[in-house]
Every structure is written in C-alpha cells, then in structure tokens.
Amino acid sequence: MYKFTLFLAAFLSLFFQSAVAAPIQPGFRGNVTLYVKSDNPDIDGQTLYTLNQQEIGLNRLYIGNYVDPKSTFFLVNSAIYQEFSDNVKIDYYVTYSPEGYLGTESGSDGITITDYDASTGAFQFSGDQFLYAVHVVDLPAYSASQYAIQVHSPADAPEGSSKVELYGRLNWAVL
Ligand SMILES: *[C@@H]1O[C@H](CO)[C@@H](O)[C@H](O)[C@H]1NC(C)=O
C-alpha cells in the first residue's frame, strides 16, 4: 500500500501542478449537491452520498440517487465538506484515501479545490481528470452494481470501471 501511495502522489503532482486555476473567494460558503457525468448511462447525472460518518478513516463516496442529508455538501474557499452532529458538530472533508478512493474524513484538510465554475458546476482539483466509478466488491452488504469513486492512471483503470467527472449543483451560497 505504501508503494501505491507513493505512486499516486507522484502521479498527481506530475499531472496537476500546472493546472490553471482561479480560486474561490474567501468567505464563500455554498450548499452543493455533487453529481457525476459519465458516458455510462447507469450512473450519468447521479448524485454522491456517504453511508457512514466514522470519525476515524475515510467514509467513501457512493454514486446513486440518494437524498438529504447524506448528499448535502458545503463548498468553501478551497474545500468541500459535510457537517454532521451527534452532540458536537463534526466536519468531514472530501479527500482521497491512500488507495485513491474519494470520500470524506474528519480531521483532514481535504483536497484543495482550486476552481469552481458556478455556471457549469465544474470543479478543478488534483486528480479531477482521472476519476473512475468502480464497483464496490469489498463490502458484502453491497452488490457489485454499486459504485465508489477512485482516482486512477488511465493505463490501469479497473476492468468494468467508467470514467466520471465530478460536478456540483449550487443550491445556495453566501459570501
Ligand atoms: C442543501 O440543499 C439541499 C437541496 O436543496 C436541501 O435539501 C438541504 O436541506 C440543504 N441543506 C442545508 C443545510 O441548507
């Protein structure tokens, strides 16, 4: 896993440092619904949600038609997060696991969102061009028809995976 992490870091830094970016204004906070665009009609246009809010480790993002609250995300200056409270409010930032899965994690700064185009809903962040919907095969409770999102080199994208792009529909925003 360590080797893979190194590979992922090298891969990302090689391809994305030169991305042209206009950052989101400080103080901006928006409620966004995340969704994917894909050539695969089974998932095109479907929203992202989390199943769990574990305080330790990554809570993977899944693709499906699911509604609030687990599909509500907030976009700020340079990150996307979810907020849940039991007794205390906890923010879970959208980030990658060492295996490249996209999910939310508390205590993480999250991946840096370098640009958001509110008119198209397109995000710019490290790895945004190399995201794949992959079958969830490691959780017995979920059928192989469910998808998570993983960043991959196109050369070794998993069999049966579909390329996806991440978009956000802005429900409201304040400055
Ligand atoms: C965010 O927007 C969604 C969709 O409009 C809505 O269902 C949800 O209640 C909103 N959440 C907050 C905290 O405003």
Image: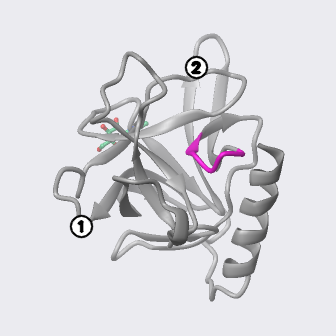
Contact? badges 1 and 2 (CB < 8 Å) = no
Residue 128 in view (yes/no): no
Location of mark 1 (residue): 39
Chain-order first, disc 1 or disc 2: 1
Residue ID for mark 2 = 85
Q: Is residue 39 left or right of residue 115?
A: left
| Residue 110 % position (x, y) | 69, 50
Q: Tell me: residue 22, above or below residue 34.
A: below
Q: Residue at x 37, y 69 (%)?
A: 121
Q: Amino acid at mark 1?
A: Asp
* Figure quarter occupied by ligand 1: top left
Of badges 1 and 2, nearer the viewer stands 1
Which amino acid does the dot numbered 2 rest on? Ser
Q: Which SS does the magenta portion mostly show?
A: loop
User: Where is 4 relative to 164, above or below?
Assistant: above
Residue occupying image coordinates x 82% and y 58%: 6
Q: Residue at x 32, y 32 (%)?
A: 144
> Within the magenta stretch, is there residue 71?
no
Q: For mark 2, does the 10 Å Cα neighbourhood hold few (<14), some (14 to 19), or many (20 or more) residues?
A: few
Q: Which residues are magenta?
A: 98-103
